[in-house]
Amino acid sequence: MLFIGIDGGGTKTEGVVTDLEGNVLSRKFTSSTNPSASTITVSVKRAGELTAGLLAALPSYGKKNVYIFAGIAGLGRKNDISRWTTEWDRQAPDLFGEHAARIQITASHDGVTALYSGTRGQSGVVTIAGTGSFSYGINQKGEEGRCGGWGYLAGDPGSGFAMGQRALQHALRELDQGYGELSGLTSTILDRIKCADRDGLLTWVYGDPAEGRTRVAGLTGALFNAADAGDTGAARIIKTEARHLADQSSTLIRRLFADEMASGNTVRHVLAGGLFNRNDWIAPVLEEEYQRQNLSVVNVFPACTPAEGAAAFLRREAGLE
């Protein structure tokens, strides 16, 4: 048997092949397989060609059964997953020829593979916090749930965009007042984007509408730098948004894992995404909230790539881990 994990993101897609012992035999990358950015037909074609490329590196694979778990961004609804797998079945004979019958695939969304990067195929909750944020979990009964992921127009609390937006508002309020010494946060933002006043800051924000959301989220670097230097306003923003992440994840943990925690089990909470690079600020807020709610939770970081985690899940399902 061979196990293939595919992590299909909005920017790139990773695929890995592992053997029964979990050794990575082949690894390849391709562009986005998010059907929302193209079509389901294109998404499947890219994932299929990636799979064919992975297997082509293993000349003897034709004699083995191949099991695939694909976590694809944009497959958040059951109907989307069904359409995607139906399209896979349609394309498989062209992609794999006589070997198609030996290849079985399970598809879901990329939150699953992100979770498995920290749990290696076991149950738990993952919070992904980058430009956006959301929490996803699955318990030992196979029950799933998610919180957050509202998108920036609805606020996306706890996200990099939300932090950057609050930092931006802080700076603009100070610049509007036009008197007194600027705070460390405002000065850090102005230095970072190399402008001197309110008009320059607004020009930077709105100068490229396609990049506006990314630019605002990118202000988190200035925000954390200012907090490190002792700016109380910056620290307050970080802690406020970190509490939103704590509320988001704890809501899901209570919903999915109440019975397991009552039985004495601890829930694994995987911290994924760029904001957790500053876990020195965020983790204490999460842990304080979990203690306040008497939740038995341990925060963990990804131990492997999401694609490797997906392959580990398949091995676990086969009784090999």
Image (tube, grey):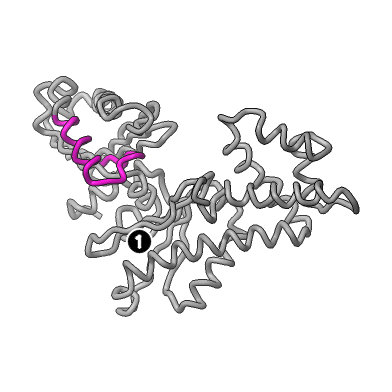
Q: Which residues are magenta?
A: 69-89
Question: Which quarter shows the N terminus?
Answer: top left
Q: Which residue is mark 1?
A: 124
State which quarter of the image contains the C terminus: bottom left
* Residue type for callout 1: Gly
Task: Choose top left, top right, bottom left or bottom right for residue 91.
Answer: top left
Q: Is residue 132 left or right of residue 42?
A: right
Q: Residue at x 50, y 76 (%)?
A: 291
Question: Number of labelled discs?
Answer: 1
Q: Residue 45: x and y, percent?
A: 26, 24
**Residue placed most toward the observer, 288 or 300:** 288
127 relative position to 206: left or right: left
Q: Is residue 303 above or below residue 96?
A: below
Q: Work out whether residue 309 or residue 168 is closer to the camera in this orientation and state it.
A: 168
Farthest right residue? 180
Query: Is residue 86 in the magenta section?
Result: yes
* Residue 67 among magenta residues: no
The structure residue drawn at horizontal position 25% and vertical position 64%, both measured from the top left corner, is 140
Binning the other alpha carbons within 10 Å of mark 1 as few (below 14), some (14 to 19) or many (20 upward) gives many
Residue drawn at 67 percent across, 36 percent down: 205
Classify residue 228 as left or right of residue 296: right
Query: How far across and down, in percent of the image, does residue 100 sit?
Result: 12, 28
> Which of the 4 image quarters holds residue 136?
bottom left
Q: Residue 277, position in %: x, y?
A: 58, 50
- In the image: residue 5, left or right of residue 282: left
Where in the figure is residue 134, as x and y percent of width and height?
44, 53
Q: Secondary structure at mark 1?
A: strand
Q: Residue at x 58, y 32 (%)?
A: 211
